[in-house]
Amino acid sequence: MTSSFQEKVMQEIRAQKKIDRAREQEEAAAKKAADEAKQKAAQERLAAKMNAIPDPEPVAVPDPEPEAAPVVKKTKKKVKKKAAKKVQRKKRGK
């Protein structure tokens, strides 16, 4: 069982929580609006900088001259000498 005093305290706490939540929502909304305004300002500054840069003039690229086909030299394959065969020794005792 709760006394009327405890009920009154609980009601005050609930009311204070509602006020706190409303304040937090307002702060979050204000922060979000400030962030969006900051982002928009940054995009405008960037756009102004990009507009200030002149477009590069196209540079004529000369046609590459056809290169002569590379000369392939034929090489002889090197033949490796085979190792001498090992002579098996006779086993003792047989």
Image (cartoon, rainbow, N blue to C red):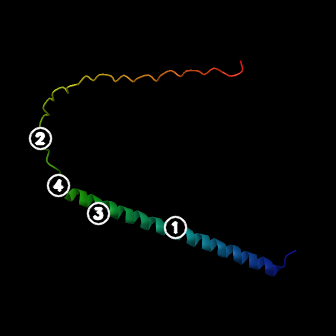
| Mark found first going from the N terminus, 4 or 3 | 3
What amino acid does circle 2 point to?
Ala
Measure the C-alpha gap from mark 4 to mark 1.
41 Å
Q: Position of residue 93 (x, y in %)?
A: 72, 21
What amino acid does circle 1 point to?
Ala
Residue position marked by numbered label 2 in the rendering: 60
Determine contact: label 1, label 2, CB under 8 Å: no
Determine contact: label 1, label 3, CB under 8 Å: no
Measured along the vertical axis of the image, is residue 1 above or below residue 73?
below
Residue at image location 11% in from the left, 37% down from the top: 62
| Mark found first going from the N terminus, 1 or 2 | 1
| Mark found first going from the N terminus, 1 or 3 | 1
Residue position marked by numbered label 4 in the rendering: 54
Q: Position of residue 6 (x, y in %)?
A: 80, 79
* Numbered disc in front, either 3 or 2: 2
Instruction: Judge the density around disc 2: few (<14), some (14-19), many (≥20) Cα neighbours within 10 Å.
Output: few
| Mark found first going from the N terminus, 4 or 1 | 1
Determine the secondary structure under disc 2: loop
Q: Residue furthest right?
A: 1
Label annotation for residue 80: none
Quarter holding the C terminus is top right
Determine the secondary structure under disc 1: helix
Q: Is residue 56 left or right of residue 85?
A: left
Residue position marked by numbered label 3 in the rendering: 45
Measure the C-alpha gap from mark 1 to mark 3.
26 Å
Determine the secondary structure under disc 3: helix
Residue position marked by numbered label 1 in the rendering: 28
